[in-house]
Structures are given as C-alpha cells and as structure tokens.
Image (tube, helix red, strand yellow):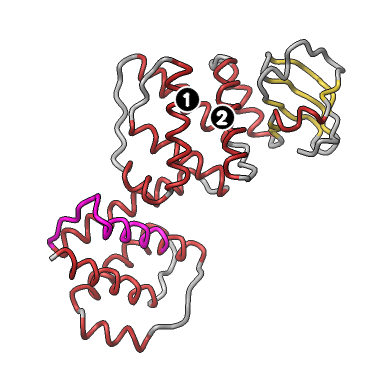
C-alpha cells in the first residue's frame, strides 16, 4: 500500500481490525496491531500506518475474515498479523491476502488442539522441508515465537503445515494443489524404492536431489515448460539402463493421472538419468 493513500474509518470491529473506505477498492478490511484503538467512524487512517496494516480487498476474503472474528481472540489476530508483516519484510514480497484467513484459522485450531493434549501428525514433514527450505525456516521462527507468546510447545509436524501456508501465500498457489504435489512426491519416492528394491535414507543427499527433481518435474508439467526434444538420448538410455527407463515411464504415467496433464517424453530422459545415479550410489 502506498504511503499517500487516505482511508476513512467506516466501522471499528476491534483494536486490530477496522472496516474503511478505500479510494480504489471501496470497502476494505484493515488488519493491524492497534489500528482500531481510539478510532471513530469518519476518522482518517493516514498513510503513515501503511506499513503497519494489511488490506483485505477481496470480498470473499473479507467475509471469511469477519467469520473468523466471531471465534478468534483479537490479540491472536494481532499476533498473526505482526508475523505476516515480518514475513513480507523477510521475503521482500507482498503475500496473497488469503494468508490472513488461512493461517490465522489454521493456527488458532492447532494451538487449541495442542492445549487439549491432542497430537499433530504430518507424514510429509521431511518432503516439505526439502521442497521449500526458506519457507520452512520462516515457519520454524514463527513456531518459536508462538511458543513464547502462547506458552505452548508446537510440535515439529506443525511447522510443515505452516510452511505450506507461507509458500501458498508467496506464490499465489492454491494450498490444496501444494498439498497434492507434496503427497504425490511422497508416493513417487515409495514406488521408486519398491521398484528398485532400495531403501533411501531420508538424510541422504540423493534423497534430497530426488525430491527436488520430482518437485521440479511436477512444476514443469503443470506449467508446460519443456526443453528441447530428447529422442536420440532417449534411445541410448532405453538400451543402457532399461530398469530405470521403464521405471521413469511408470512414474510419468502416475504424474499424468494425478495432475491431469500430458507429460512430454523428454521427462523420461531426465528421470532415467536421475534414477540411474540413485541406483549406482545406493546399491
């Protein structure tokens, strides 16, 4: 938000949330620590606060956020908002406004479950950390901060879920799609291990390379960004490494089914080379 935008207060919902009139977006929801304190209808919220609050412009997000206010404590909203502010500074990027609804709602219930002594299981924690290391580091910071603020011990599994929320808001990608990709990578790794009859240590550098490669492959398929045709190399690899070549086609079929997108033949070359390197170092 620019520092020169003047907004006029329409309604104060609590100390941290107000509804205001915006010159470009009509009615907006402003979230910021202490933004509603001492404010009355018609007051101006000047640009000097611009770094300190977030605007929800999307009407659907506004409605969802209003629903949040009915059950989430306003201090909690202030704390999560403060952290989103830190994230934007850290990544130097404006985050998708949905994070205010998605992350606040998710963490509110997660902390509630933890306080009730209920556990949190996350089978994709390691894959998530490997795929999104920067977001994972930021999520780790947030959990330490929340532990202090709410006097809880947020388990490690929760860091993975927060990571996905941060990644979703940074990339404007749908959370369900990111979850699907993480699960798909996990499933593909399992198929590779079964097919090659190997057990890859989750701490091994080869595992890291494999997970990253599979994530990149999925992204290439989703965005349909492919390099040149690899037909000549494909024939060589088919003869040289039939086991890995056949496995690469099996994996490609699964990706095609799950992603509902065609997988170009060139992917067989990249996958075969990757799998062959894995076989030669694991066996």
Q: Residues within 10 Å of mark 1 (few under 14, many from 20)?
A: some
Q: Describe residue 112's horizontal placement relative to residue 250 as left or right.
A: right
* Whether residue 98 is situated above or below residue 68 in the rendered picture: below
User: Horizontally, is 145 left or right of 69 in the view?
Assistant: left
Q: Write down the residue under mark 2.
A: 83
Secondary structure under tag 1 reads helix
Q: Position of residue 51 (x, y in %)?
A: 72, 32
For the point 68% across and 20% down, which residue is it?
17
User: Quick one: quadrant of the C terminus?
Assistant: bottom left
Q: Which residues are magenta?
A: 197-216
Dot 2: few (<14), some (14–19), or many (≥20) neighbours within 10 Å?
A: some
Residue, disc 1: 145
Quadrant housing residue 206: bottom left
Q: Quadrant of residue 22?
A: top right
Which residue is at a point 71% across and 36% down the rendered structure image? 57
> Residue 69 falls in which quadrant of the image?
top right
Residue 127 percent location from the top left of the image: 33, 48
């Amino acid at each position: 938000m620019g520092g020169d935008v003047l907004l006029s207060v329409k309604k104060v919902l609590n100390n941290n949330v107000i509804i205001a009139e915006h010159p470009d977006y009509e009615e907006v929801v402003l979230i910021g620590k202490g933004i509603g304190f001492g404010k009355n209808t018609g007051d101006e919220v000047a640009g000097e606060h611009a770094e300190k609050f977030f605007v929800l412009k999307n009407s659907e997000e506004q409605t969802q956020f209003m629903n949040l206010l009915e059950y989430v404590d306003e201090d909690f909203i202030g704390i999560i908002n403060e952290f989103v502010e830190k994230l934007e500074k850290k990544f130097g990027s404006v985050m998708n406004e949905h994070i205010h609804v998605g992350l606040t709602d998710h963490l509110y219930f997660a902390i509630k479950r933890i306080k009730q002594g209920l556990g949190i299981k996350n089978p994709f924690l390691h894959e998530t950390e490997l795929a999104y290391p920067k977001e994972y580091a930021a999520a780790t910071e947030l959990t330490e901060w929340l532990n202090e603020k709410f006097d809880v011990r947020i388990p490690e599994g929760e860091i993975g879920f927060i990571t996905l929320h941060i990644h979703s808001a940074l990339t404007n990608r749908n959370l369900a799609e990111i979850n699907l990709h993480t699960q798909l990578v996990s499933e593909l790794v399992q198929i590779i291990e079964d097919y090659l009859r190997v057990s890859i240590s989750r701490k091994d550098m080869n595992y890291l390379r494999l997970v990253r490669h599979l994530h990149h492959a999925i992204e290439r398929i989703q965005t349909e960004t492919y390099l040149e045709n690899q037909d000549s190399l494909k024939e060589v690899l088919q003869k040289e490494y039939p086991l890995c070549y056949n496995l690469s086609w099996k994996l490609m079929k699964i990706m095609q089914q799950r992603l509902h997108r065609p997988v170009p033949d060139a992917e067989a070359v990249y996958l075969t080379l990757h799998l062959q390197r894995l076989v030669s170092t694991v066996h």
